[in-house]
Amino acid sequence: MFKKTGLTLLILVVLLASNSLIAAAEEPVPTDNTVTGIEVTGNKLVSEEEVLEEVTTEIGDEVSNEKLQQDMQQVFDLGYFFDLQILFRNYEDGVKLVIEVIENPELSAIKIEGNQEISTEKLKELLKLQEGEILNVNSLDQGVERINQYYQEQGYVLAQVVDVTIKEQDQLEITIDEGRLNSVSITGNEETEDFVIERELTLEEGEVFNIDQMWNDFRNLYNLGYFKDIRPDMQPVPTDPQAVDLVVEVEEQKTGTFSVGGGYSSAAGWTGMVDVEKDNLFGRGQKVNLSWEFGDTTTYELGFYEPWAFGSETSLNFNLYRTEHDDPVDDVSRRQGGDITVGHPLADDITGYLQLDYHNTKYEDEDGEEYDDNTRSVTLKTIRDTRDNIFSPRSGSRQELSVENAGLLGGDTDFTKYEADLRNYLPAREKDTWAFRLKTGLSDGELPQGERYSLTGLNEIRGYSSDYYDRDNNAVENGFVDGNSMLVSNLEYRFGIVDNVTGVAFADAGKTFANNSDISLNDLNYSVGLGARFNTPMGQLGLDYGYAPEGELDDKTNLSIRIGNTF
């Protein structure tokens, strides 16, 4: 770090001042050494009064070399003088003290060099020195400290002021070295290819090093799900004290899963599932998944994800799916189709998506007649994600906004859906978390049965029994299915219990509405409850027990099993 004693200019000032004081003390003192006068000479911009305020020796005092040394140090500490000395002159039967000073230059210009990441205007603001004013070395020292501190706060931990000089024509020149990343190397990866890691690093060799940028890169790496741990090792460069070599140490974890299990929810009853998933396929960061869920509803899904298509940050996602209901849900007995999604970063932490979807829906009308609808839709979506960990976040937020239009590309349906999903996470105590979520959906046009909003799956209001999701038991009137609009909110407090077990206290509220204008915060279904999350080899399993105050008298509670967090 830059210090006053490290500046050539200030060292000279201290040395010259010390020599002057010693010389002054060695001058012969008259026999009568009573101070009969005090005078300041050599000053042009600094007033005599300001100097004399620092002098404790007074007229009538006996001359004391020790006290004069202290007085001169205090004058020097004003910061305005390059040199000063004290002279003794016979005056009125005693001694006049003549304080002779040489002022620092009046700054004609202030020049800052070496800065790239912080503007010169900002640095001059921190320096707090003005052109046309006398140089005060105390203010200069404080300004330099403010500059160094500001660089640290902005994450430039290697940056510092390395030189301060006075050039010709009284120009102050400050040189800054912002520090740099000399090299990056990766160790510990056996399956994952180096380029998969390197493409997540925005840090570049030879560029200014920012530790906040490094941690953000590490967060993105961790959120890939390929690594159990990621550690930085910053090594000094012997030939360059303002540079570091960064070693990225990774510890890989399993990225392939084969899961067999079952679950129960109010909406679907008992279900079974078989899921085969491979992340980081062949160590190239790709993903493939095949899933089969069975019960009253049977679902098949095949998907492939490429996070870095065409050698750029553009992602591609392909899905094929088919869902069949033994008992029609919302009068839908079958739905099958596929979608293609293209994603690309728009700004820091913001990604835009374009999705093309085609599916065929088979449903029954009120008279039992069967119909097929072909839906072709285009969805525009943006996601801003600042969560510290996408799998178990403790801080940050996620905002998803989307617009889906069907009919623009033809098909049998014509509607537009607008959705917003807002989530926020706040750390509490040492390891606990507050989690908030608000989701809303609106629509224009006539939504077909398969596209209407329902409070099932991830939008479920925990605590209501399956009867509330049954169309034949007033589910529409109760605000659980068949909505043209929807509003859902969730509040969870997540707390650790033991290793691999997390407790959850929750409150849910939500409802579907016949029209957008019907949305009301005073007319929601709500519930409270407790739950637990268990980390298992096949993923996180959740168990929630909810209480619904507005449920039927004999049916106000419900137990549900889920995979992962609600949000």
Image: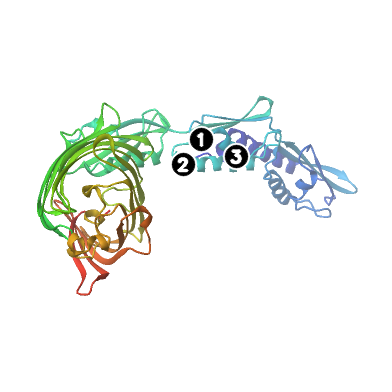
Observer able to see residue 132: yes
Residue 118 - label:
1
Separation of marks 3 and 2 at Cα, in angstroms = 16 Å
Q: What residue type is labelled 2?
A: Gln
**Counting other residues with Cα less than 10 Å from the Cα at mark 2, is it few (<14), some (14-19), or many (20 or more)?**
some
**x and y percentages locating residue 241 in the rendered image:** 43, 33
**Residue 504 x/y as whole percent:** 26, 62
Question: Is residue 98 positioned above or below 107 on the image?
Answer: below
Dot 1 amino acid type:
Ile
Q: Mark 2 points at which residue?
A: 154
Label 3 element class: helix
Residue 181 location, quadrant: top left
* Numbered tag placed on residue 125 in the rendering: 3
* Numbered badge on residue 560: none
Mark 3 or 2, nearer chain start: 3
Left or right? Give the position of 181 relative to 341.
right
Label 1 or label 2, whichever comes before in sequence order:
1
Residue 17 as seen in the image, left or right of residue 202: right
Residue 30 visible in image: no
> In the orientation shown, which residue stands out farthest toward the top?
168
User: What separation in Å lies between label 3 and label 1 (alpha carbons)?
Assistant: 11 Å
Mark 1–mark 2 CB contact (< 8 Å): yes
